Image: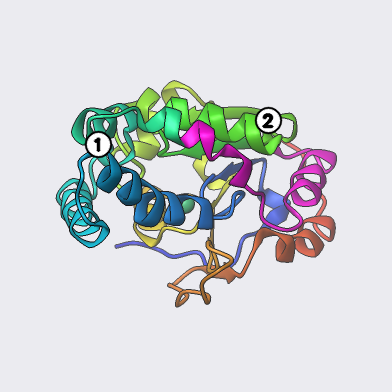
């Protein structure tokens, strides 16, 4: 049986595991890139109309959903016939932090919590986004699912994460916009589980699942400040 934590107990939280896209960074960049920009480029390169190009790419995305290929820029470069990372680099000026992210991460650091980015993004995409957003200086560690060999939605992920991050699940808080990823972490025994319900600033909030839910991480700052960490 899965015991769901409805609110994060910040006093017990020594390690905060943070998703990147949708939690720290505005998912608008990714949604726009994969749904609009890449199909437009694919249509231009292969001399197709935009609607057919988009339909074709959407079918390919669906086929790879739930696998690491879905996040693999090299896989997609091979599939579309041009360099997807290069196209992302040219769009990098549009990568944006969500509001109050530096303030939230600084508050975590100032109150003694370790901040570890854990993303399904490919290492090339992660490096590009860290550089473009300036996020790196607010983090104590970064992990790509490609270092682990499986995505966060797979049941073995949080156990395997111990290979690269020394953490106690009962004293860790995971902040995610993905309900499947929160589900595998809940099953593993993660102490705190928080859903960010508005990953894309251009879209309305998504329905909250069975976890603590906030529109954005800025809403968590008062709770962190009010709960100094326990020793040990
Ligand atoms: Mg996400």
The residue carrying pointer 1 sits among few (fewer than 14), some (14 to 19) or many (20 or more) residues within 10 Å by Cα, namely: some
Name the side, left or right, on which 157 lies relative to 133.
left
Q: Position of residue 85 (x, y in %)?
A: 42, 29
Residue at 72% across / 66% down in the picture? Answer: 219
Q: Position of residue 71 (x, y in %)?
A: 33, 39
In magenta stretch: residue 111:
yes
Q: Is residue 179 above or below residue 117?
A: below
Q: Is residue 229 above or below residue 31?
A: above
Nearer-the-camera pick, 127 or 59: 59
In magenta stretch: residue 3:
no
Name the side, left or right, on which 150 lies relative to 221.
left
On-image quarter of the N terminus: bottom left
Residue 229 visible to the viewer = no
Nearer-the-camera pick, 111 or 29: 29
Q: Is residue 196 above or below residue 72?
A: below
Instruction: For marks 2 and 1, give the CA distance.
Output: 25 Å
What numbered label is drawn on residue 190?
none
Start and end of the magenta stretch? 88-114
Residue topped by disc 2: 136
Q: Position of residue 197 (x, y in %)?
A: 53, 69
Residue topped by disc 1: 69
């Amino acid at each position: 049986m899965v015991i769901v934590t409805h609110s994060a107990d910040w006093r017990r939280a020594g390690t905060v595991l943070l998703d990147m896209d949708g939690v720290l960074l505005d998912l608008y960049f990714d949604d726009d890139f994969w749904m609009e920009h890449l199909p437009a480029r694919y249509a231009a390169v292969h001399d197709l109309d935009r609607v057919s190009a988009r339909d074709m790419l959407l079918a390919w995305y669906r086929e790879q959903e739930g696998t690491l290929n879905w996040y693999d820029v090299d896989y997609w470069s091979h599939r579309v016939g041009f360099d997807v990372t290069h196209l992302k680099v040219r769009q990098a000026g549009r990568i944006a932090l969500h509001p109050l992210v530096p303030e939230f991460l600084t508050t975590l650091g100032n109150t003694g919590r370790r901040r570890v980015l854990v993303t399904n993004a490919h290492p090339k995409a992660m490096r590009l986004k860290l550089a473009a957003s300036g996020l790196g200086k607010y983090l104590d560690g970064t992990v790509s699912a490609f270092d682990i060999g499986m995505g966060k939605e797979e049941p073995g992920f949080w156990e395997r994460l111990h290979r690269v991050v020394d953490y106690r699940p009962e004293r860790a808080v995971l902040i995610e916009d993905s309900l499947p990823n929160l589900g595998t972490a809940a099953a593993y025994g993660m102490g705190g589980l928080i859903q960010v319900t508005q990953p894309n600033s251009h879209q309305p909030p998504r329905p909250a699942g069975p976890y603590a839910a906030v529109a954005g991480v800025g809403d968590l700052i008062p709770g962190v400040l009010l709960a100094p960490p326990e020793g040990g």
